[in-house]
Amino acid sequence: MRNITDKIYYAGAQADGGFLFENQYEVPNGVTYNSYVIMDEKTAVLDTADAKVGEQWLLNLKEILSGKRPDYLVVSHMEPDHAANIGTFLKEFPQAVVVANQKTFDILACYFDIDFSGRSLIVKEGDTLGLGGHTLQFFMAPMVHWPEVMVSYEQKEKILFSADAFGNFGKTSDIFLAAGKEEEWSKDAARYFLNIVGKYGKPVQQLLKKAQGLDIRMICPLHGPVLRENLSFFLDKYDAWSNYRADKAGVLVLSASIYGNTDTAGAYLVQCIQEKGVPAKHMALAGTDLSYAVAEAFRYQTIVFACATYDGGLFPCMEDLLYRLSSKNFQNRNVALVENGSWGPMAAGKMKAELEKLSGIEFIGQTVTVKGAVQEADRVKLAELARAVAAV
Ligand code: FEO
C-alpha cells in the first residue's frame, strides 16, 4: 500500500518501456499512470489508468479499498491513458457516482456506452465536494491538455491533483520525487510537456494563475512522481515553457544529414561556439525520436538549423522537425542556418520559408552553404557563424 498522506493513497501503475506513448513518443524508461484514492467518511477515487496497466491498477485500488465501496470517481481528463478503465470501474463499483464537468460527460459518451442516470455529479469552476474531513475543490483547466480537463485541490492537506500538468515520462521507484532531483526531473518533463501540451501555452498560463491563488503543499500529477519539495522550481519551469521562454543558456545546433557531412558541420560549429566559452549542444536528427529535439529547441534561445538538400527540398527529418515546432507554437527565437547540397543546395531557403511563418523569429549570422564534405573554406565560414551566434 502506498501512502501519499495518512488518508490519501497512490493506486497508480507503471508500464515498462518498449512502446510508443501516444503511439509516437519513445519512452525508454516506461511511464506511470497515476490514480489516487482519498479514504474519508466518503471515499473518492481520482482517475483510472491506461488499458495496458488496467489489471495492476485495479489490484492496487482494491487493496487500498480493503472491501470498502468507493462513493465517487473523479474524472479529470478523458484521454484514454487515464480514462480507459472507467467502464471497468463502474462495473466493479456500480454504486459509485462519477464526478466531472459537463464537457467530460460529453466526451465520456464518445468512449463508453454507459447510462449515467443517477450516478453523475456535474461540477463547475470552484465547486466543492465534501468527503468528511477532506474537501475537493474543482478548477477547470481547458486545453491542458484536452478541453474537458479539470484539476482538483484538496483543501485540508493542500494537495493539487494536477491532471497532465507537471507530469513526466519514466517509471518511478518512489512515489515522490527525491529532494535535489529537480534538474533531472526537468529533462523528460520538458519533453513530455513541450511535445504534448506545448501548443497550449496560454491555457497553461491561465492554470498557473489559478494555482497562484492556492496554498499548495504537494502536486499529484497523472504521470511521474508526486512533487512535494521546492515547488517553486516546477512552477517556474512551467511558467517559462508555457511562455515559450528559453530556460537553458547557450546555442543548440540541430543537423539533418544523409551521409554525415552535415552532422560534421554541426559538430564543428558546436566546437567553435564552445571555444568562445559559450555552452553549445549538437543533436543529429536522422534516425532519432524527434521529441527530444523539439524539447531542446524550446529550451534554448539560439538555434542553428543545419540540413542537407534532398529531392530539391529538406531532408525529411528536418522537414518533420520544423512541422512539429510550428504545430507546437515555437516562437521568439534567434536562428541561424547551414545548408548542404553538392549540386543544387536549396535547404536554407526552404528552412527560412518555414521559420518565417512563425512569430518572433530573428535570423542571425551569414547562412553557410556546404557542398558535400566539410572542407577548410567551410570551416572558416562555420567559425564565422559561430562568432555570430555566440555573441547573441
Ligand atoms: Fe496523460 Fe492527456 O493524457
Image: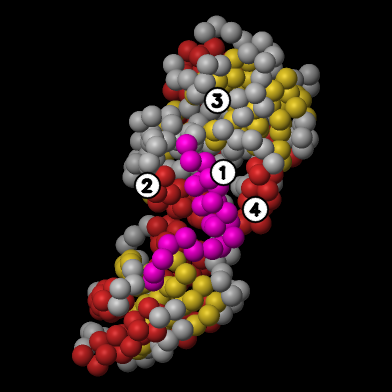
Q: What are the residue bounds of the magenta stretch?
A: 229-251
- Please tell me which of labels 3 and 1 falls first in the chain: 3
Label 3, label 4: how many angstroms apart (C-alpha)? Answer: 25 Å
Residue tagged by mark 4?
Answer: 205
Which numbered disc, 2 or 1, marks the residue that appears first in the sequence? 1
SS category of the residue bearing label 3: strand
Image height of 250 relative to 2, above or below: below
Counting residues from the start of the chain, the first of labels 3 and 4 encountered is 3
Inspect the image, locate mark 4, and give the three-letter code of the amino acid beneath it.
Answer: Gln
The kind of residue tagged 1 is Ala
In the displayed structure, 20 sits above or below 123; it is below
Q: Residue 184 — which label? A: 2
Question: Does any portion of residue 256 appear in the rendered image?
Answer: no
Foreground disc of the pair 2, 1: 2
Residue 46 % position (x, y):
60, 27
Of the image marks 2 and 4, the number of the one nearer the N terminus: 2
In depth, the one of 19 and 368 nearer the eye is 368
Q: Amino acid at mark 3?
A: Tyr
How far apart, in angstroms, are the residues tagged by discs 3 and 1?
15 Å
Which residue was labeled with disc 3? 36
Characterize the local packing of mark 3: few (<14), some (14-19) or many (20 or more) Cα atoms within 10 angstroms. Answer: many
Q: Quick check: is the Cβ at mark 2 less than 8 Å away from ligand 1?
A: no
Q: Secondary structure at mark 2?
A: helix
Mark number, residue 139: none
Residue highlighted by disc 1? 165
